[in-house]
Image (cartoon, helix red, strand yellow):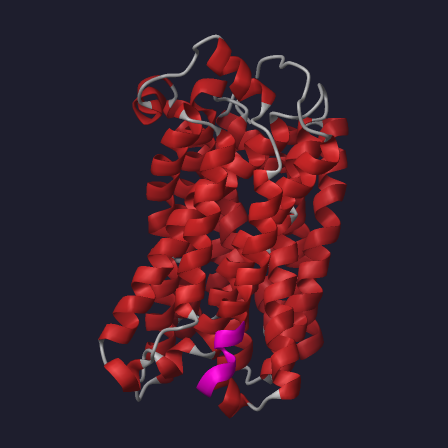
Amino acid sequence: MTNHPKPLNSPFKVLIASLAGTTIEFFDFYVYATAAVLVFPTLFFPSSDPTSAMLQSFATFSIAFFARPIGAMVFGHFGDRIGRKATLVAALLTMGISTIVIGLLPGFKQIGVFAPLLLSLCRFGQGFGLGGEWGGAVLLATENAPEGKRSWYGMFPQLGAPVGLFLSSGIFWVLLHFISQDDLLSWGWRIPFISSILLIAVGLWMRLSITETPEFQKALETEERVKVPLAEIFRRHKRSLFLGTFVAMVTFVLFYIATAYLMSYNVKVRHIPFLDALAIQIFSSISFGVFIPLSGKLSERFGRRAVLIGTTVLIGAFSFLLPVLLGGSETGILMFAVIAMALMGMTYAPIGTALAAPFPTSVRYTGASMTFNLAGIVGASLAPYAATWLQGHYGLSYVGYYLLVASVITLLCILASRKGEV
């Protein structure tokens, strides 16, 4: 990356704006993931076979991951052509409106097959918005970072993931302390989706209070922009796009096994009460949040590449513990969740800066966003579905093998990358 001019925004304002936006986006995203297990199979996919209903619910969950690269292309284009600030505001509104509308949808009993169709459309909107959010938030932080502080600044938008997970799990946990499960299915599930309007207002206020990043401002002044950033990516940066996609693969597989799949496994297979299953997810989100800044500091000291290699090896080793911990007591399941999310924090903190690093300013929004969201397709879109299917047909060991294969692919791509590409 190039040296950049003096930052126009205060470090506090930059880091809070990047964190606030990703917190809101991931809160919206994880509220859906929780509802996909607890609520949607009953309300939108009624079936005599609970497993089929769950798989259908996870299928709508995956739609967002296929929408995210499209959002990355569209928002990335305008982020590289018009600016980071305006594009981030548009991405936040797209995600937020989609989430609020989900909270207003009628169920299958009211409008039949149109209910899951509308749910799928809103889920597409969530993915489309998040596809433009993540890359812009990382650039907002890293393009304002002082020299030598990119990994540390790039860690802050990543903190939005554990904070969003904590808040989304927490709101369902609080609801179930005040209303019955029948009330949750009847009307209570709508509250987390509609209440996101408050978070959106805060996020917009923060985003509108910042100025354009100094690196993009410099690109404007020197006319470094390209007409079609996506075409430039495929013409000059195919290697970085390909390697980056699979460098981030295990990050996604690990996360969605430890969240969406684990929630389903706990509630539907192990018959753990909703509240206990949510408590496990809340504890794991704390572990996630603690290890992100730790990894950010280690990345500054030893380098992103070293941290990513070491963590990927540990994830591969951890995959052999998966059937042991998940097949044991509830304490073992909690241990699995906490360890998995600690490893997630270690790999997630540097991944944003690593994926943005190989792309020049003129195409960085598009390149980082496309890489991250293509990784979402190969690593996350089918992870809850695939893990549920593997566990149902072959047992927990094969869920562990699935995680192991993902870690091997990621490790090979990190090792294949040149200095500066990760």
Residue 384 x/y as whole percent:
44, 63
Q: Could you say which is closer to the camera, residue 263 or residue 414?
A: 263
Quarter of the rendering containing residue 362: top left
Residue 230 x/y as whole percent:
33, 27
The N terminus sits in image quarter: top right
Judged by its main secondary structure, the magenta piece is helix
Residue 60 x/y as whole percent:
34, 64
Residue 388 x/y as whole percent:
43, 69
The C terminus sits in image quarter: top right
In the picture as drawn, the residue positioned furthest to the top comes out as 222
Query: Magenta part of the protein: which range?
Result: 186-191
Is any part of residue 307 visible from this angle? no
Q: Is residue 42 left or right of residue 334?
A: left
Q: Could you say which is closer to the camera, residue 205 or residue 41?
A: 205
In the picture as drawn, the residue positioned furthest to the left comes out as 113
Q: Is residue 240 above or below residue 72?
A: above
Q: Residue placed at 43% from the left, 11% from the top?
A: 224
Q: How many marks?
A: 0
Q: Residue placed at 55% from the left, 85% from the top?
A: 271
Is any part of residue 88 visible from this angle? yes
Q: Is 382 part of what is drawn in magenta? A: no
Q: Is residue 215 left or right of residue 32?
A: right
Q: Residue placed at 35% from the left, 61% from the top?
A: 122
Q: Is residue 375 above or below residue 338?
A: above
Q: Could you say which is closer to the camera, residue 324 or residue 330?
A: 330
Q: Is residue 92 left or right of residue 283?
A: left
Q: Is residue 233 above or below residue 397?
A: above
Q: Residue placed at 58% from the left, 37% from the top?
A: 351
Q: Could you say which is closer to the camera, residue 176 or residue 388?
A: 176
